[in-house]
Image: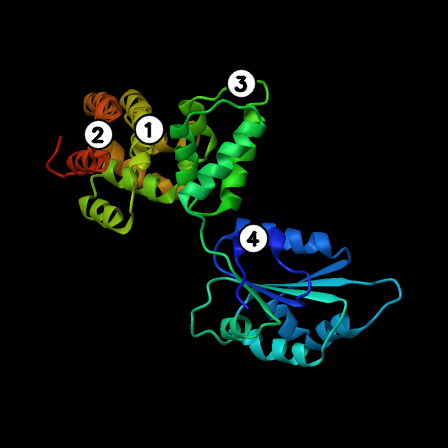
């Protein structure tokens, strides 16, 4: 039977088997926590692969009773259709005082495991789809209100947009902000940008690195593969500005020692080994004067977007393509 994930507290405790499938790990955690709260007993975690390698031990742990154990909660992680027959076997044994949670990722409609749980009324099937930004924004607003932290809706949207539809990611970012804001009544956009790990956003970093390296084909591929939002535009420009300033600093050092390898190897903070080659290309493409002009243009572009906010994606995309062109500069 299909149950609604947003009605966690209404999920009946009468079920023995629960199937959670989807990519929203944060929502899964909340559902598992709710089921666990109702079943105060021993919790056993298994990987699907581990079960098949130790099948006899697995069945022994499930079927063996104990005077000291009134309940057991079995969680099977990274499950797939391979476990379908084993679940059928457990259903036939009519086990009692045990709850089994099957934690799977995305299961196609033709999945045998998904079909079994959707059609059988005695089995609970709970799809956990990605949260939409409206839901995440509401959760974030409640969090900041309870924490008495003043924050603008624009900054809430900025945080939410980095969470890829997963409240687990949202909670992680909110906790970092809460810790940072312990002695503060409000938090600025600049502080938000530093806290939400924008440097780890692969799409943004890769896009900007290739723009500075003037790799136009790669830039076009990244732009085509990503669906950036209006809120992303300021973040992209800020990240671009940080990287441009790093290139300027390295360029100034290169002018002093006239040794590219030495400049790269002695950089502070150190340049990660996998980034060294692209940084070398960037330093060959940009001299000090040109990188200073780029920084000036970045600030003006951000100001232009903040003043009008009309079609910011087009503005930023055109700017990146222009700066990444081999014929430019």
Picture quarter with the N terminus: bottom right
Mark 2 vs 3: CB contact within 8 A: no
Crowd tier of the residue under label 1, counting other residues whose Cα lies within 10 Å: few below 14, some 14–19, many 20 or above: some
Q: Residue furthest left?
A: 327
Task: Give the camera-side residue of 226 and 250.
Answer: 226
Residue at x 26%, y 24% (from the top left corner) = 306
- Mark 2 vs mark 1: give the one in front: 1
Residue 286: mark in rendering: 2
Secondary structure category for the residue under label 3: loop
**Distance between the Cα atoms at labels 2 and 1?**
19 Å
Q: Earlier in the sequence, mark 1 or mark 3?
A: 3
Q: Are marks 2 and 1 in contact (CB under 8 Å)?
A: no
Q: For label 4, count other residues whose C-alpha is less than 10 Å away and answer few (under 14), some (14-19) or many (20+).
A: few
Q: Position of residue 240 (x, y in %)?
A: 30, 31
In the image, residue 139 sits, relative to residue 185, either above or below, namely below
Element assignment for label 1: helix
Colouring mode (rainbow / by chain / secondary structure / one colour):
rainbow
Q: Which residue is mark 3?
A: 185
Residue that carries the numbered disc 4 in the rendered image: 7
Q: Nearer the viewer, mark 1 or mark 4?
A: 4
As drawn, 39 above or below 214: below
**Residue drawn at the location 29% of the way across and 28% of the way down:** 244
Q: Residue at x 41, y 42 (%)?
A: 133
- The residue under label 1 is 238
Q: CA distance from mark 4 to mark 2?
A: 55 Å
Looking at marks 2 and 1 on the same chain, the residue that comes earlier in the sequence is marked by 1
């Amino acid at each position: 039977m299909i149950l609604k994930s947003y009605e966690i507290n209404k999920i009946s405790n009468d079920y023995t088997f629960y199937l959670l499938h989807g990519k929203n790990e944060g929502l899964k955690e909340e559902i598992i926590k709710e089921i666990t709260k109702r079943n105060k007993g021993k919790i056993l975690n298994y990987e699907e692969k581990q079960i098949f390698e130790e099948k006899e031990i697995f069945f022994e742990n499930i079927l063996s009773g104990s005077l000291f154990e009134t309940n057991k909660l079995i969680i099977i992680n990274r499950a797939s259709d391979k476990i379908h027959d084993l679940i059928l076997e457990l259903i036939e044994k009519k086990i009692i005082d045990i709850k089994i949670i099957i934690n799977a990722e995305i299961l196609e409609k033709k999945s045998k495991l998904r079909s079994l749980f959707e059609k059988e009324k005695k089995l609970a099937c709970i799809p956990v789809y990605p949260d939409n930004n409206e839901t995440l924004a509401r959760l974030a607003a409640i969090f900041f209100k309870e924490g008495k932290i003043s924050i603008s809706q624009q900054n809430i949207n900025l945080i939410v947009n980095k969470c890829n539809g997963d409240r687990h990611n949202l909670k992680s970012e909110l906790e970092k902000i809460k810790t940072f804001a312990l002695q503060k009544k409000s938090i600025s956009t600049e502080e938000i940008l530093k806290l939400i790990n924008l440097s780890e956003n692969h799409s943004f970093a890769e896009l900007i690195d290739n723009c500075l390296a003037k790799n136009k084909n790669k830039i076009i591929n990244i732009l085509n593969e990503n669906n950036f939002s209006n809120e992303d535009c300021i973040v992209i420009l800020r990240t671009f500005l940080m990287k441009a300033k790093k290139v300027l600093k390295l360029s100034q050092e290169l002018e002093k020692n006239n040794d590219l390898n030495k400049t790269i190897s002695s950089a502070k903070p150190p340049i990660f080994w996998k980034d060294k080659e692209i940084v070398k290309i960037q330093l060959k493409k940009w001299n000090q004067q040109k990188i200073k002009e780029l920084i000036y243009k970045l600030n003006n572009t951000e100001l232009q977007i903040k003043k009008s906010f009309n079609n910011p994606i087009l503005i930023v995309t055109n700017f990146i393509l222009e700066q990444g062109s081999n014929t430019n500069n």
